[in-house]
């Protein structure tokens, strides 16, 4: 695996820390900015929506630009967005800084994924994506708790400064270690890349990714009240259990990245099935502290075990448009990260209890499993057609010679 891929993983660590750290900083931000906690929570939604919108837009806007130059520009804008957030004098400026950071983050994810794929052989795509996703997993294990710690002891702005510093380190890595990747002789055209959205397999890949991610984060977003109000754990346990989820995510990413290149559909089917079973078990056993903690760890494993395969699958079916493939995957994940928590909040507001998001999440992953099954059937049908066609062509000369 090229060192440059690990540099991209380091960059993703900074991006992921910024994306998720606000969950532990909302109370002090709300107090300092003189807004309610729900309004402060819109800063999280703004980032997720910025990722959904920004990934395809930035990918399209930078389609004909050199890849390394684009990565340097995007990580620089992202770092400046963190500085703007740290210096924000009011809520409006902080909100704007989150939107700008999200756009740059989305663009970096999309282009960075395409660069990582371009630097490795086809048989190592899932492993390359596992390295990038591993940066996100480590952000959940180390970055997010560290941001909460800094926010508690040095103020919430210190967490933004820390991410800005991490972005500067990533910038140096991109400048010195990412090779120049020449554009193809025939320059890509946006109209040509947009053709991928006519492919049923691409649309099924988007649907699968959004449902698989959304189902997990439907439950995960409301894990804190589940732990304290249903399982009966002290609030001090929450950060430790969240870190345990991150450790599970890191393990799942490693295993999935190793296996997915050889058994892509096997990983998708087994991983999403496991997430569904774990979510159902979490809903049924939510009152048991031991079971809830153990299932949270296993949910991290199953969710991120599937992630490299979800990324690699998109590049496999949309190989003719590698930049838009990365952007589409990023947008699909964040559609799930936006829709899942919304659905979880909806069922809670319906007075169904804090265990209800786990049921709703299981319903989403079950639909994702159906999408994978359909994609596999279409894949096998296409393979049979190609094989039959090739066999027929090989027999024609023999018939002619007779």
Image (spheres, rainbow, N blue to C red):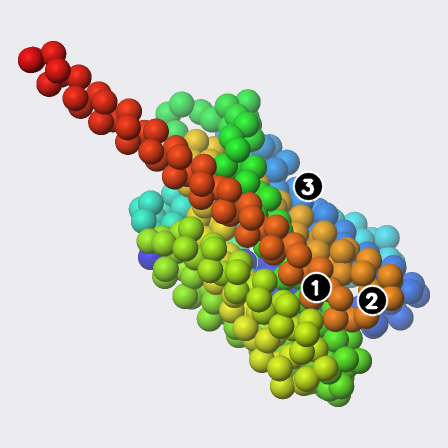
Residue at horizontal 6 percent and vertical 13 percent from the top: 402
Q: Element type at marker 2?
A: loop
Do labels 1 and 3 touch, CB within 8 Å? Answer: no
Residue 352, image quadrant = bottom right
Residue 24 or 158: which is nearer the viewer?
24
Q: Element type at marker 1?
A: helix
Residue 352: numbered disc: 2
Quadrant of the image containing the N terminus: bottom left
Depicted 379 relative to depicted 362: above or below: above
CA separation, marks 1 and 2?
A: 10 Å
CA separation, marks 1 and 3?
A: 29 Å
- Could you tell me residue 296's position as x and y percent? 61, 74
Of tags 3 and 2, which is closer to the observer? 2
Residue at horizontal 58 percent and vertical 69 percent from the top: 278
Asked if one can make out residue 237 in the rendered structure from this viewpoint, the answer is: yes
Judging by the rendered image, the residue that carries numbered circle 3 is 53
| Dot placed on the residue nearer the N-terminal end, 1 or 2 | 2
Depicted 303 relative to depicted 99: above or below: below
Judging by the rendered image, the residue that carries numbered circle 1 is 359
Depicted 277 relative to depicted 154: above or below: above
- Could you tell me residue 365's position as x and y percent? 61, 56
């Amino acid at each position: 695996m090229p060192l440059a891929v690990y540099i991209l993983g380091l960059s993703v660590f900074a991006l992921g820390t910024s994306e998720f750290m606000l969950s532990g900083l909302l109370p002090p931000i709300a107090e300092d900015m003189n807004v309610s906690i729900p309004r402060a929570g819109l800063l999280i939604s703004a980032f997720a929506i910025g990722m959904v919108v920004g990934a395809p837009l930035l990918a399209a806007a930078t389609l004909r630009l050199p890849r390394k130059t684009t990565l340097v520009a995007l990580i620089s804008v992202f770092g400046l967005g963190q500085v703007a957030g740290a210096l924000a004098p009011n809520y409006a400026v902080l909100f704007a800084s989150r939107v700008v950071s999200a756009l740059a983050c989305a663009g970096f994810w999309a282009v960075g994924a395409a660069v990582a794929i371009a630097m490795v052989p086809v048989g190592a795509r899932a492993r390359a994506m596992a390295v990038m996703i591993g940066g996100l997993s480590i952000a959940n294990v180390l970055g997010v708790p560290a941001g909460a710690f800094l926010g508690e002891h040095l103020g919430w702005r210190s967490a933004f400064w820390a991410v800005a510093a991490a972005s500067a380190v990533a910038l140096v890595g991109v400048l010195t270690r990412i090779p120049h990747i020449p554009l193809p002789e025939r320059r890509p055209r946006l109209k040509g890349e947009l053709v991928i959205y006519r492919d049923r397999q691409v649309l099924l890949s988007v649907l699968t990714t959004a449902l698989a991610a959304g189902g997990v984060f439907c439950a995960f977003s409301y894990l804190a009240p589940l732990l304290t109000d249903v399982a009966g754990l002290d609030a001090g346990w929450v950060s430790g259990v969240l870190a345990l989820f991150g450790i599970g995510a890191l393990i799942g990413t490693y295993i999935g990245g190793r296996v997915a290149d050889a058994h892509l559909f096997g990983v998708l089917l087994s991983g999403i099935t496991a997430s569904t079973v774990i979510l159902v078990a979490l809903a049924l056993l939510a009152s048991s502290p031991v079971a809830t903690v153990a299932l949270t760890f296993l949910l991290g494993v199953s969710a991120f075990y599937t992630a490299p395969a979800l990324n690699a699958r998109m590049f496999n079916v949309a190989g003719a448009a590698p930049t838009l493939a990365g952007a589409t995957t990023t947008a699909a994940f964040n559609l799930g990260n936006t829709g899942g928590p919304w659905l979880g909040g909806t069922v809670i507001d319906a007075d169904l209890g804090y265990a209800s998001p786990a049921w709703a999440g299981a319903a989403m992953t079950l639909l994702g499993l159906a999408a994978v099954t359909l994609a596999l059937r279409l894949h096998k049908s296409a393979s049979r057609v190609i094989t039959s066609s090739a066999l027929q062509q090989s027999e024609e000369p023999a018939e002619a010679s007779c």
